[in-house]
Image: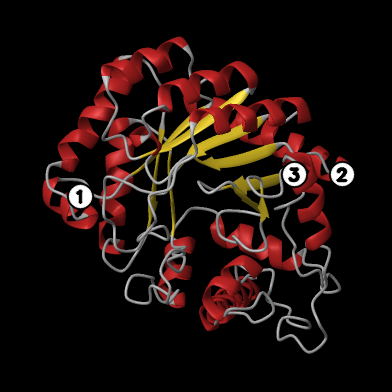
Amino acid sequence: MTENNERIGRTEFKTHILKEAEKQKILRQVSIEILDYCNYNCDYCYVHGANNSTINLHQFKNIINELADAGTLWVTISGGEPLLHPDFISMYSYAVKKIPYVTIFTNASLISSEIINLFKEKPPYEIEISLYGVDDNSYDSFVKKSGKFQLFQSGLDKLEKNGISYSLKTTITRQNVNFLPLFIQYANERGVKYRYDSLVLPKIFESSSKINSEYRLSPKDAVDALLSRKGMLEKATDIYNGRNSNDNRLYRCNAGINSVAIDSKLKMSYCVALREPYYSLSEDGKGIEAGHQWLMQMRNQNLDRSDKCFNCDKKALCRYCPGRFYLETGSEHIPSEWNCLYGQYLYKKIMMSKENKRGNI
């Protein structure tokens, strides 16, 4: 089985397990932010301006023990940059003993010989690495730190030399959108899986919570970036054709049902985007299972008839997400203008494609 086929198989397996977990309301997937700071200074990052908080090793082990007892299958260790944590090696080693599938999100600039030996002995389920540029100038200017591209390249070289698989990913912004063909080429030359997304979240830790309008692509450009990927127009068309116009649940994803996020302040929430409401594992003291039950109860809401999204047939296309709405408008019930325009433009593209197909018959 090739690496690409293996990853496709992993994705299908994971999707199947999570669908079964949704039916049973079992917590199968958890993201743990072990710290909220980074060795980069990317302007667009939603954790930019964090408070330098961390989960300590004792707290982390308690979390992993509870998750293992609950039957959790997937844990993602993230940050910030998780490899900055002084106890990362101990944390990772403990997690892989208890949890079947452990994923690491990293920028690869801190991959040392010690980390390589750790991953060789106890391979992660996945390592997802952010790609910010393809040379010293484009990379270092984006992360606002000098010399980082060389460290990034060195990290990838070490992984490849030791047969440790990884994938690359990019958040596409106004600053790097013109590099997209080069990003794809770079990943192809490395022979690794690559994905990109135009989603830029408001900065969670800034008091103003102002949207990064100077970084996020316009809705039109974001749709065009999406549709530049092979098969995405057909996929979007299938999603629209299969929409359920009568589904007026406020929360339409699985967040809080079979997946949650735990941040570096031990706040347990639906996901990394929607950090409120949260259940405090440090203050409430009743543990993850109690927090999971509380979050499921809290998300059991419907859209109000007066909500703009209530009768909208494009919420299957607009990247509908109450968490993003909350960050941008201050309410889960008020959609952002960006999402509305995104849905309208994608709908227009779908209709144009249908008209063109009819014209060719």
Classify residue 129 as left or right of residue 34.
left
Q: Which residue is mark 1?
A: 139
Which residue is located at x 54 percent, y 83 percent? 337
Q: Quadrant of the N terminus?
A: top right
Which residue is located at x 31 percent, y 34 percent? 108
Residue 41, position as x, y percentages in the image: 26, 55
Q: Amino acid at mark 1?
A: Tyr
Q: Choose the circle earlier in sequence order: 3 or 1.
A: 1
Q: Choose the circle earlier in sequence order: 2 or 1.
A: 2
- What element does badge 3 sit on? loop
Q: Which residue is mark 3?
A: 258
Q: Which residue is mark 2?
A: 23
Q: Nearer the viewer, mark 3 or mark 1?
A: 3
Classify residue 129 as left or right of residue 251.
left
Residue 321 seen by the camera: no
Classify residue 228 by image quadrant: bottom left
